[in-house]
Image (cartoon, grey):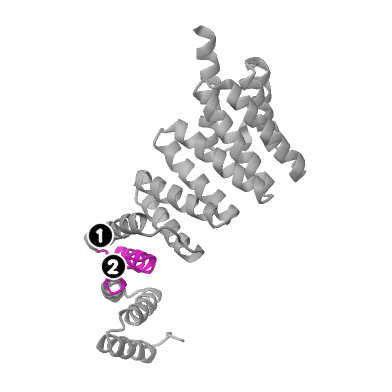
Amino acid sequence: MEIGDNNSASILEFLASEALRKRDYESAARYFRHLAVHFGIINNKSNKRRFSIKAGECYMQAAEGFGKSTKAIMLYFRATEAFKEGGDLEMARFCGLKMWEQYLALRENVSRLNSEDIHAFKVAGDHFVSNGNPEKAALIYQDAAERALKNGKLLLAGGLFKDAGNCNQKLGNHEDASSLYIKAADAFFQCQEYFEAAWSYCEAGFLLIRLGRFEEALELTKRAEESCYKGRIEIFLKDLIRICKLLSQGHLEDAVENWRRIKAKLSKEYIQLIESSFQSIKSSRKC
């Protein structure tokens, strides 16, 4: 619907009121959301905030009507985003807590989820990551990954295991992170996503080196090399695998030489991961 003028805004307000009268809270929320966008475009900040909050309230009421379900999780998520846009951070936090409660109830009582349900879990995980709670996100991502794996959704499972691994790495849980990266890599390998498989095996390898588990890291470099071979991957990822292999074999000087050539190509996050692996080798030599 075109909402570029005041007449359109009036129509949307009428439609929202009618939806509320019929207790169709989800439709009402959608109309209020359109109004918030409309007033945001014309730089009417007070009305943007007002209708964002109304949308949040309606999404929340709609969620309450769905009981314990992934549909409710999605509606609480939309409510959270709407309240944030309206500046009501207290209600946004409240809806975030309701998302967590919904997840816990479903984890305990629902044994099997379809792809749409698993997507709702991922949305919840993404919410907690963006709000600075990687611990909750890690639990949700891993649960969703295991369920996706049971459903034979290998690519989805791989991505979720990777997300869970990233959260654990942020938390400093390097052993759990390495295990999750391996699960991600195995899933990616099975569905022939060889680049993602090689990358995940390599990340797990560097974490295992950091933990002093050099033989396991060496085994992972072999799996990473196989992934590169099957995927015909010739870019710098092969250089990273070579560095991981050299470190796992204790060849520090050769690894340093290779590292100097490619360091500038990587983000700060990966530089820190790899250089911590170098430090582990140096420490092991002192023992």
Q: Which residues are magenta?
A: 63-89
Residue occupying the point 53% across, 27% down: 208
Q: Nearer the viewer, residue 206 or 255?
A: 206
- Residue 14: where, in percent of width, then height? 31, 91
Structural crowding at the residue carrying mark 2, measured as other residues with C-alpha within 10 Å and reported as few (<14), some (14–19) or many (≥20)? many
From this view, report whether residue 26 is shown above or below residue 213: below
Q: Is residue 124 left or right of residue 188?
A: left
Examine the rendered structure and indicate whether residue 152 appears above or below residue 68.
above
For badge 2, the amino acid type reads Gly
SS at circle 1: helix
Residue 67 included in the magenta stretch of the image: yes
Please name the residue shown 32% across and 72% down the image.
66
Real-space Cα distance between discs 2 and 1?
A: 8 Å
User: Looking at the picture, which amino acid does disc 1 mark?
Assistant: Leu
* Residue pictured at 43% horizontal, 42% vertical: 167
- For label 1, the residue is 89
Evaluate whether residue 31 shows in this view.
yes
- The answer to which quarter of the image holds residue 56 is bottom left
Residue 133: x and y in percent read 34, 47
Q: Is residue 235 magenta?
A: no
Q: Position of 99 compared to 242: left or right?
A: left
Label ID, residue 250: none
Residue wearing tag 2: 86
Q: Main secondary structure of the magenta part?
A: helix
